[in-house]
Image (cartoon, grey):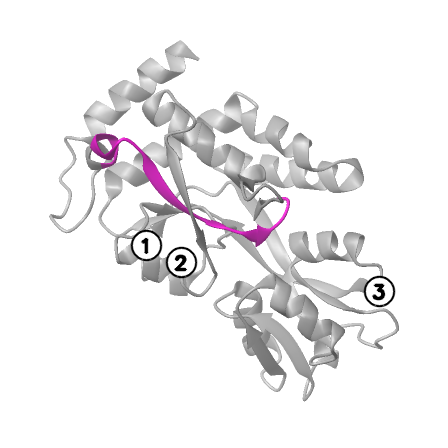
Amino acid sequence: MKRILVLLGLLILSFSLVSTPTEAKTLLNIIEDGKIVIGVKADYPPWSAINEKSDFEGWEIDLCRKLAEYLFGDPSKVQFVAVTSENRIKLLNSGKIDIIWATMGQTPQRAQEVDFSVPYFESGVRLLAKKGSGINSIYDLSDKKVITIKGTTGAQALAELVPKAKQIKVDTTHEAIQALRNDQGVAFAQDDLLVFTLAMYNPEFEVVGEHFNTTYWGVAVRKGEEDVKAFIDVSLRLMYETGFLQESLKKWWGGWVLDEYLRRIEKVFQER
């Protein structure tokens, strides 16, 4: 670990020499602040959520703390800010947070507003519905009400693939589940990772339909902050090569789901 920290220290020094726009924040600025402020999800267990003790926990939270350890030598040098799919880019570009690490799929539209790190995971969209709903495909959703979360890849993909679906857009996962229970929509379209979790803990629901709109997850940084992006890229590669990404995931998952998610990690890193 000491060797890794020394190497990253040298990288920080080299990145500080990179020309950065005056309105952007450099990696040295973050170091001078004494902490890194990261926008994370508060309602996406076990990836990132607030537990009963009001603490953030989950796989992405573990990765954020490891990033702080690489940067400061101390995993506690991180401040978490709860974000939603709709407000996270606004909070980043207004300077309220330093980076976004919030189950964020890389899309061409988002890439116009932020820069992304190398991918560290892959997901797609599936449907959650009440058992016996009769919904078997996204194409059964035409002219029907479907619950989505504002600003998500699920909402965007559904609008493209089934433009006649009538989206009921909410802000949080909790609101989406309540809307589905109350029959405000026939299904909830969201990342397959989340809907599988929701189905496990809510036996009245089941995952239906095909997997669609595969996307890679990345950490988002402000445009022009090349040194911050480069440091995150190197850190993610180190987390993968040292096995930290994989071992942390094992804390939160088991069985065939874990095997599938480990396969996805291998896929995204082996492709690059």
Disc 2 packing (10 Å; few <14; some 14–19; many ≥20): many
Residue closest to the far top: 2
Mark 1: which amino acid? Leu
x, y percent for residue 248: 60, 30
| Cβ atoms at labels 1 and 2 below 8 Å apart | yes
x, y percent for residue 129: 77, 69
Mark 3: which amino acid? Glu
**Which residue is rendered at x = 58% and y = 38% of the image?**
59
Element carrying mark 1? helix
x, y percent for residue 130: 81, 70
Q: CA distance from mark 2 to mark 3?
A: 31 Å
Q: Earlier in the sequence, mark 1 or mark 3?
A: 1
x, y percent for residue 171: 52, 68
Element carrying mark 2? helix
Magenta stretch: give its range.
30-46
Q: Nearer the viewer, residue 118 or 43?
A: 43
- Horizontal arrangement in the rendering, residue 92 relative to residue 85 (left or right): left
**Which residue is rendered at x = 14% and y = 51% of the image?**
23
**Which residue is rendered at x = 18% and y = 31% of the image?**
16
Q: Compared with residue 206, is residue 17 higher up or lower down, i.e. above or below?
A: above
Disc 1 packing (10 Å; few <14; some 14–19; many ≥20): many
**Which residue is rendered at x = 45% and y = 46% of the image?**
101
Q: CA distance from mark 1 to mark 3?
A: 37 Å
Report the residue marked by disc 2: 88
Report the residue marked by disc 1: 92
Residue 204 bears which disc, if any? 3
Residue closest to the far left: 22
Q: Compared with residue 95, is residue 143 higher up or lower down, i.e. above or below?
A: below
Residue 173 bears which disc, if any? none
Q: CA distance from mark 1 to mark 2?
A: 6 Å
